[in-house]
Amino acid sequence: MTPEAGTTETRQPAGVARADELALLASLPTGLFIGGEWRPASDGGTFDVCDPSTGNVLIQVADATPQDGLAALAAASAAQKQWAKTPPRVRAEILRAAFEAVTARADDFALLMTLEMGKPLAEAHGEVAYGAEFLRWFSEETARISGRFAVAPDGRSRLMVTRRAVGPCLFITPWNFPLAMATRKIAPAIAAGCTMVLKPAALTPLSALLFAQVLQQCGLPAGVLNVVQTTSAGAVTGPLITDPRLRKLSFTGSTPVGINLLKSAADQVLRVSMELGGNAPLIVFEDADLDAAIDGTMVAKLRNGGEACTAANRLLVHESIAEEFTKRLVERMRAHTVGRGTEPGSLLGPLVDEATRAKVHELVTDAQTAGAHLALGGAYIAGAGYFYEATVLTDVPATARIMHEEVFGPVAPIITFATEEEAIALANDTEFGLVGYVFTLDLNRALRLSEELEVGMLGVNTGIVSNPAAPFGGVKQSGLGREGGFEGIEEYLETRYVGIADPFAAVS
Ligand code: NAP
């Protein structure tokens, strides 16, 4: 099937932006945010940010040069000492004010995110609430940073352990969650007393720019957060990673880029957090509540258009229920309304760009060539924008690339299994280990799988696990470190131990 052969119709916009969109875009800061000031790129360069539902240019923003990147690090480095000494309550209150401000401007953030990334407005609102919640969670954690004090086992000294801010950080974030991937790093860094440079994805820098403006309005001191959007990611971030003033790198993105960044970070023995790719298995056992399993699959597969590291990439379904499961999933996915994210009722927006759409189609075609059966979709949607049909593949052979690579689109590949052992072996047959999903009403089986699956997170009878109060992160090639939860702030703290002589020695 050729990419253009699909029959699904979208309700495409005429290509003319609405007045509220134009007004929001006109109000945005478009410069680089360095040392508390908005400034153009040092060479005056700009780049286009486009609407994936039309391909039209939304706005132009400053395009940071390597010199701008170093200026941002200089600003972060200059602010670090004073910022780390700020009373925790002051840092907490800035975060709390930012939570209130983002929540109050949820409509603006959601619309902006839909415009630059394409997700339906209702999902964009979900991300705003999720992203804001990191600000509230870490505002509450700020005052709980503590150390310990102990008498040494031999009684001859005292052991004092304190927690200190790691220092200036570099954050590199992806396009799929333009606000939440930033707040998940920025909020714990502010809480811990770190300063930072953020490099958002070139496809979606607008949410980060608006967020930086909100933090500025909430009283974040100059230099604590600096934002350098750029089309030269490697050239701008490379010199920062090898600069001794930088003390921490936190990256969210693909595993190949993460591996290269880890290699660069090794030269400075940088602290690193890596939130990388996934290849999530979603396992439906014969004893599952099928309604819940279908609902969970729809969320795990189609939330964010399938463009999520947590997206269910492989549906493993017990052979006794596979036919019924497939029939019901196809019905639900066929009824999923495709359209520009701003349109009422739109449940599936465009993919973020043509390269992403081409990769999705390549994986679908490869699976068919390998012997998979196309039960739904499988084609581009004609017209403007990067729309792709909701797609279901069955009988997918283990050799198909889609079993091993993130599809990052609305494609559900189904394979069957006969036993629990087989399901576990299939699920673990990947170098990734971010998240898994299990649908079963057997408590012991769920507990067995929570121990046997090689993942950092597991959803039991649910298709969504992300929660700001829980540690998000993976094992194997899905990454290092955790974001959110009590664990999230640990990434931005280092431990200092002070040994103190026995205070009674002098008087004995
Ligand atoms: P990506 O291509 O790795 O890009 C992520 C970020 O890295 C972008 O800001 C990108 O800049 C930047 N980048 C690319 N090459 C770089 C280089 N050589 N040096 C420094 N920075 C560089 O990933 P993506 O396509 O944006 O996002 C999708 C990936 O992110 C998927 O694999 C997904 O699973 C993963 N992800 C993981 C999590 C998680 O928490 N585990 C969450 C969300 C997404 P440009 O924008 O200029 O390319």
Image (cartoon, helix red, strand yellow):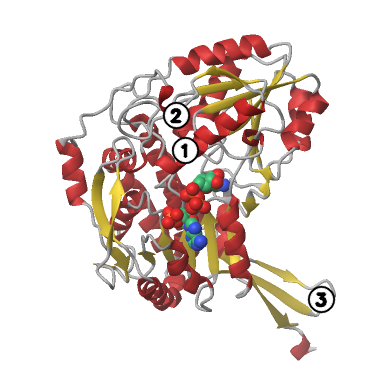
Looking at the picture, which amino acid does disc 1 mark? Ala
Does dot 2 land on a helix, a strand or a loop? helix
Looking at the picture, which amino acid does disc 3 mark? Gly
Q: How many C-alpha atoms fall within 10 Å of the one at disc 2: few (<14), some, or many (≥20)? A: some
The residue sitting at 63% across, 9% down in the picture is 324
In terms of image quadrants, where is residue 236? bottom left
Could one spot residue 436 in this view of the protein? no
Marks 1 and 3 sit apart, C-alpha to C-alpha, by: 67 Å
Measured as percent of width and height from the top left, residue 439 is found at: 66, 22
Q: Earlier in the sequence, mark 3 or mark 2?
A: 2
User: Which residue is labeled 3 in the image?
Assistant: 155
User: Which residue is labeled 2 in the image?
Assistant: 3
Nearer to me, 366 or 346: 366
The reply to whether callout 3 and callout 2 are in contact (CB within 8 Å) is no
Q: Earlier in the sequence, mark 1 or mark 3?
A: 3
Marks 1 and 2 sit apart, C-alpha to C-alpha, by: 8 Å
User: Which residue is labeled 1 in the image?
Assistant: 358
The residue sitting at 64% across, 23% down in the picture is 372
In terms of image quadrants, where is residue 347? top left
Marks 3 and 2 sit apart, C-alpha to C-alpha, by: 75 Å
